[in-house]
Image (spheres, rainbow, N blue to C red):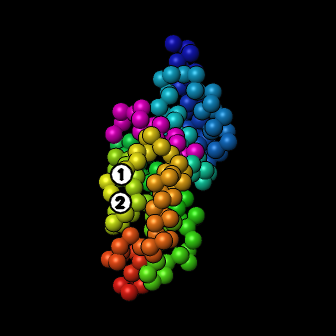
């Protein structure tokens, strides 16, 4: 019983440091809690939030995805999916060439992905190149997808053809503005 009380106190102390934005100390205490099985899913969720706050988005996404796979809390699973989506969008925006959009050239393969609520990921949903092939973020991490043979072939196709089709909304975006 005493051990359970101590583990709960350590866990609560870690959460307190996390809420105070003292992330290094919080991570230290969460590491101490990791030997207590009753807090496993909670620790994963808390670490995911900390890494998100620290702008370590790849680590954060990995923890959120791990949490999604093992948790039964539907509300927090939904929140985790939103955080993964936000992290990926930040990574995409950070790595996107901001000057890539010009009339007649689709920038989608270098700028966008679509992530569904169930973790399925594929090129922009307006793109004709998308032929039903999806990847699952529980099986592949975002960077593996972003650099996959499928996406490399998509980019090569766009470089050779300017767009996925003459009706490509991304290639003709300047006409619509």
Residue at which label 2 appears? 130
Comparing 4 with 56, the one in front is 56
Q: How far across and how far down the image is residue 123, in percent? A: 40, 60
**Residue at x 54% of width, y 46% of height:** 60
Where is residue 128? Give x, y as percent. 33, 66
> 33 or 168, which is in the foreground?
168
Label 1 with label 2: CB-CB less than 8 Å = yes
Tag 1 residue:
133
Residue 145: give x, y in percent of width and height: 49, 51
| Horizontal relation, residue 81 to residue 63: left or right | left
Res. 88 in view: no
State the residue at coordinates (44%, 73%): 161
Mark 2: give few (<14), some (14-19) or many (20+) Cα within 10 Å: some
Could you tell me how far apart the alpha carbons at marks 1 and 2 are, in whole angstroms? Answer: 7 Å
Q: Count neighbours of disc 1 (C-alpha within 10 A) and say few if under 14, some if 14 to 19, many if 20 or more.
A: few
Give the vertical position of 170 relative to 118 (above or below).
below
Compared across the picture, whether 45 is left or right of 27 comes to left
Q: Which portion, as a residue range, is magenta?
A: 59-74
State the residue at coordinates (40%, 52%).
121
Q: Residue at x 44, y 45 (%)?
A: 137
Queried whether the magenta region covers residue 102, the answer comes back as no
Magenta residue check for 70: yes
The C terminus lies in quadrant: bottom left
* Magenta span dominant secondary structure: helix
Circle 1: element type: loop
Is residue 39 shown to the viewer in this render? Answer: yes
Q: Position of residue 83 (x, y in %)?
A: 46, 51
Identify the residue at the far front of this view: 160
- Reply above or below: 19 against 37: below
């Amino acid at each position: 019983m005493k051990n359970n009380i101590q583990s709960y106190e350590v866990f609560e102390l870690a959460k307190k440091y996390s809420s105070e934005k003292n992330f290094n100390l919080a991570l230290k205490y969460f590491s101490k809690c990791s030997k207590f099985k009753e807090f496993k899913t909670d620790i994963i969720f808390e670490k995911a939030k900390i890494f998100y706050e620290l702008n370590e988005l790849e680590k954060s996404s990995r923890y959120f995805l791990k949490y999604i796979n093992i948790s039964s809390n539907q509300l927090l699973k939904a929140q985790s999916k939103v955080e993964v989506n936000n992290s990926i969008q930040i990574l995409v925006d950070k790595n996107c060439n901001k000057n890539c959009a010009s009339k007649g050239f689709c920038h989608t393969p270098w700028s966008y992905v679509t992530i569904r609520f169930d973790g399925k990921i594929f090129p922009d949903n307006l793109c004709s190149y998308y032929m039903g092939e999806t990847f699952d973020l529980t099986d592949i991490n975002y960077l593996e997808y972003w650099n996959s043979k499928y996406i490399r072939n998509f980019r090569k196709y766009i470089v050779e053809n300017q767009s996925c089709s003459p009706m490509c909304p991304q290639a003709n975006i300047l006409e619509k503005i």
